[in-house]
């Protein structure tokens, strides 16, 4: 295994960390840099194979930094005493699109067989957040969510089933970002 130039790698990590901390105010540049460097140390054998490629090191640093910042953001969102949509709640909001607002109004306080939950007036805000979140998703995710959860059609195959899980997770994140941007 070739010897790694840790100072050069740290310099790249430092630049990426500064950029990430500007885009993600929830993290500090030093913490991001440390995460990147820990990853490089843990993966030193693989990093050494492309250590001379600055673009590879930069992309690796970005991937690690974004992953760390995203985890920190999600952790903060869970603990900030604001409402946080789960993927199950995103699914429920999607399934509620089968009903008009008037039909939902008549169901408030009753148990819904389709969603298997008691309908509360919170469904209106969840529906609005889901509609806003859907607009933020890729066309593919929107199409899969519409087919499976709104139209109630079964997934075409196992690949589409897995895509629907990722799409629901992405929708929950988009719904949560929509809630936070209303502050």
Image (cartoon, helix red, strand yellow):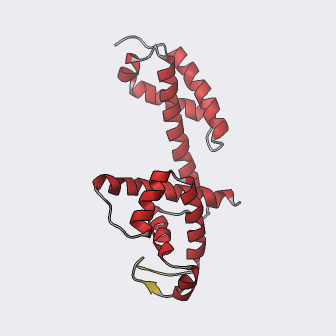
Note whether 52 is above or below 35 in the view shown: above
**Which residue ends up furthest to the right in the rendered image?**
183
Q: Quadrant of residue 1?
A: top left
**Which residue ends up furthest to the top in the rendered image?**
2
Percent x, y of residue 34: 53, 30
**Which residue ends up furthest to the left in the rendered image?**
158
Note whether 12 is above or below 65 in the view shown: above
Q: Residue at x 54, y 82 (%)?
A: 104
Depth order, front residue of 113/32: 113
Q: Residue at x 53, y 38 (%)?
A: 66
Percent x, y of residue 179: 63, 61
Q: Residue at x 50, y 79 (%)?
A: 99
- Apparent side of residue 22 relative to residue 166 in the rendered image (left or right): right
Q: Quadrant of residue 100?
A: bottom right
Note whether 105 is above or below 65 in the view shown: below
Percent x, y of residue 105: 57, 85
- Apparent side of residue 32 relative to residue 147 in the rendered image (left or right): right
- Give the number of callouts: 0
Q: Quadrant of the C terminus?
A: bottom right
Q: Residue at x 48, y 63 (%)?
A: 86
């Amino acid at each position: 295994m070739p010897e790694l130039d840790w100072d050069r790698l740290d310099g790249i990590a430092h630049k990426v960390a500064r950029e990430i901390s500007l885009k993600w105010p929830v993290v500090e540049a030093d913490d991001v840099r440390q995460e990147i460097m820990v990853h490089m140390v843990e993966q030193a054998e693989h990093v050494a194979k492309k250590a001379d490629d600055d673009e590879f090191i930069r992309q690796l640093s970005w991937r690690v930094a974004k992953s760390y910042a995203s985890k920190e953001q999600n952790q903060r969102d869970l603990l900030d005493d604001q409402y946080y949509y789960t993927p199950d709640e995103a699914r429920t909001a999607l399934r509620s699109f089968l009903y008009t607002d008037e039909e939902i109004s008549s169901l408030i306080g009753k148990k819904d067989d389709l969603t298997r939950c008691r309908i509360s007036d919170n469904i209106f805000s969840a529906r609005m957040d889901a509609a806003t979140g859907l607009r933020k998703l890729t066309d593919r995710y929107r199409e899969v969510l519409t087919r499976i959860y709104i139209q109630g059609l079964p997934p075409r195959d196992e690949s589409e089933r897995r895509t629907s899980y990722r799409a629901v997770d992405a929708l929950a994140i988009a719904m949560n970002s929509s809630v936070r941007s209303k502050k």
